[in-house]
Every structure is written in structure tokens, then in C-alpha cells.
Image (cartoon, rainbow, N blue to C red):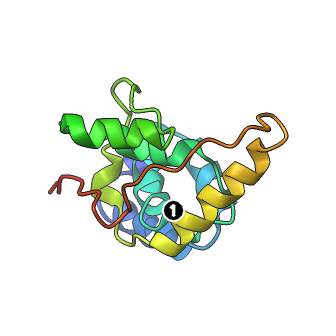
Amino acid sequence: MASKIFMGNMLELMEKILNNLDKEIRSLYSCALVSRHWCEMSIPIIWRNPFSLYIVKPTFISIYISSFEDLEDDVKSILKEYGININFQNPLFPYVRFLEILSLDSLNSSETLSETRNLNRNPKPRPKPETSTETLKLPKHQ
């Protein structure tokens, strides 16, 4: 039954419906849990502009970075200095391909929020690396 829904025009209609939910993050997450097909249509929409979401999770950067296939050693060392875990194995989706909008201001504010949350757990602040985000060049994927 479910396979018939995703044949013909229904797939196109479903994509249009999900695209209209791009501001309804909870609805998109719920849709991603319905079935494999819905998940494959919902996840790219969620990861199009993840910085616009009000849900700030520090694991976002690690998950996103893990979808790059080859990172140079100097990039890896910079990411480790910032406390970004790059040791995720085989992400489920090529997240880097979905990203359409990269807001450095939002990234910076999410990092600040993450550090504020961790302040109670780790009272000793770690030193900031000398590298700025402008010098961090990540590979482009198509």
C-alpha cells in the first residue's frame, strides 16, 4: 500500500507539502519518522538551513562535518581545537549536500549558547584557538 503512494504524482505532491512545512521543524521531524520514504524527503528540508532552527544542538557541527569524505589534517586539528568531534562513522545522509544557507552569525551564537550551557559542568573555560572561521576552508561537494 505504501509503495503505491510514492508512485506517480503522489511523490511530487508529497514533496510540495513537505517543502511548505520548512518552518515547522517539529512537523518535519515527525514526518521523517513515518517511513523511509518520508524520511528521505524530510531530512534534506530540515538540513537546508539548520541555523534558522530554534533548537540549538552542539552535535550539529559534528554531524555536518562528518559528512565530508576527506578532511585535510590541518582542518581536522583546527576542528579538534574547537572541541568538534569528527569521529562519527558513516552518517545516514550526505548532510553537506543539503546545506543551502550558512549563517556564521547563527553558528557563532549557537557556539556561545553551547559554551554557556557547559559552563556549569566545566567551570574552567578552554582557550580559543587562534584560527578564525574565515580561514577554515571546508571542501565543496556536489
Q: Is residue 3 visible?
A: no
In the picture, residue 55 is in which quadrant? bottom right
Residue 27 falls left or right of residue 39: right
In the picture, residue 140 is in which quadrant? bottom left
Dot 1: few (<14), some (14–19), or many (≥20) neighbours within 10 Å?
many
Give the residue at x 45% y 52%.
43
Give the residue at x 56% y 45%.
127
Give the residue at x 65% y 50%.
30
Task: Look at mark 1 in the image and give the residue it sits on.
Answer: 50
Considering the image in quadrants, where does the C terminus appear?
bottom left
Percent across and percent down for residue 136 are: 29, 57
Q: For this rendering, which residue is in front, 127 or 78? A: 127
When the figure is inspected, residue 19 is found, relative to residue 78, above or below; the finding is: below
Give the residue at x 35% y 43%.
78
Percent across and percent down for residue 5 are: 42, 51
> How many numbered circles are shown?
1
Local SS, label 1: helix
Q: For this rendering, which residue is in front, 106 or 20? A: 106
Q: Is residue 81 visible?
A: yes
Percent across and percent down for residue 9 are: 33, 66
Percent across and percent down for residue 85 are: 46, 32
Q: For this rendering, which residue is in front, 57 or 14? A: 57
Residue 75 falls left or right of residue 60: left
- Callout 1, which amino acid? Pro
